[in-house]
Image (cartoon, helix red, strand yellow):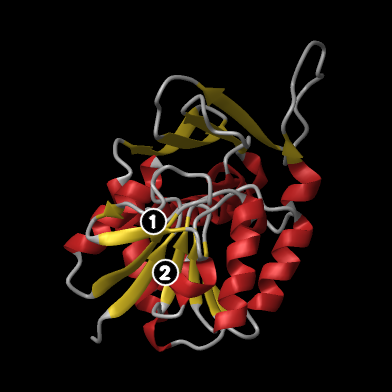
Amino acid sequence: MSIISLAITGAGGRMGRALLTAATLDHHVALAAALEHAASPLVGTQVNGVMVSADLDAALTNSDVLIDFTRPEGSMTHLAACHRNGVNAVIGTTGFSAADKRAIALFAESIAIVLAPNMSIGVNVTMKLVELAAKSLGTDYDIEVFEAHHKMKVDAPSGTALKLGEIAALARGQSLAEVGIYNRHGLAGARKSGDIGFSVVRAGDIIGDHTVYFAGAGERIEITHKSSSRENYAEGAMRAAKFLANRKVGLFDMQDVLGLK
């Protein structure tokens, strides 16, 4: 495998630092650029052997793949730059609007993109297990999705929780837009058959917990994934970047990267 040159955004954040560390430890990738916003005190300093820059287009000149775990508005700007420069992208950002997702699909007609709400290898195996359980159990079993994250996370439910719900709904021939329940308060009434409920916790420094409950008559199945470190997300992102090495166009997810489809 040839060496993949990476540009990594959000160099000063917790996820950015995890990505930078993973890139320096992976012998199949090379860290070409570390990026931060123009007002960051890190700009002009060295991190993991590279100078932190705010010049996105310049950083992409020597990069094969951009890895971005920021926020939707930043990711869309970064993807537009990738489109201009012919650079592939790995996007782990969550909270995209429907319009953002349509724009990403258009970008994927000219560059290759891995877009996933969660890059963890374990989470993506969990998604496959949820698909199997939902398909096998059907609507006789009630589905609830629980997730917990740190208090600084701004979107809810998490992108991973929504993806788990979407997978479960599709496996039962449903649309999450029609059966997802996100707010229960007061006299909410009895549960409707086929609904998929979501519960959210925001507290402390929880990195990420997700559980999908399948509750039937006399039994309950719980499929759970808990993250204790951001390293697993970073390692998944490295695999995603290497997956894009020989791809020119297309929109992919971690199920593609891991061969789970």
Q: CA distance from mark 2 to mark 1?
A: 8 Å
Judged left or right of residue 47, residue 70 is right
Question: In the image shown, does 25 or 183 lie closer to the viewer?
Answer: 25
Q: Is residue 102 visible?
A: yes
- Residue drawn at the location 22% of the way across and 60% of the way down: 49
Give neighbour class at mark 1: few <14, some 14-19, many 20+ (Cα, 10 Å). Answer: some
Residue furthest front in the image: 44
Question: What is the secondary structure assignment of the residue under circle 2?
Answer: loop
Q: Nearer the viewer, residue 151 or 139?
A: 151
Q: Which residue is mark 1?
A: 125
Residue 48: which quarter of the image?
bottom left
x and y percentages locating residue 67 in the rendered image: 44, 63
Q: Is residue 241 left or right of residue 78?
A: left
Q: Measuring from the top left, give residue 169's x and y in whole percent.
A: 66, 52
The quarter of the picture where residue 144 lies is top right
Residue 260's disc number: 2
Whether tag 2 and tag 1 are in contact, CB under 8 A, the answer is yes
Q: How many marks?
A: 2
Does residue 227 appear to the left or right of 252 in the view shown? left
Q: Residues within 10 Å of mark 2 (few under 14, many from 20)?
A: few
Q: Amino acid at mark 1?
A: Val
Whichever of callouts 2 and 1 sits on the residue coming sooner in the sequence is 1
Q: Does residue 114 appear in this view?
A: no
8 or 152, nearer to the observer: 8
The residue shown at (68%, 73%) is 105
Would you place residue 115 above or below residue 131 in this image?
below
Circle 2: residue type: Leu
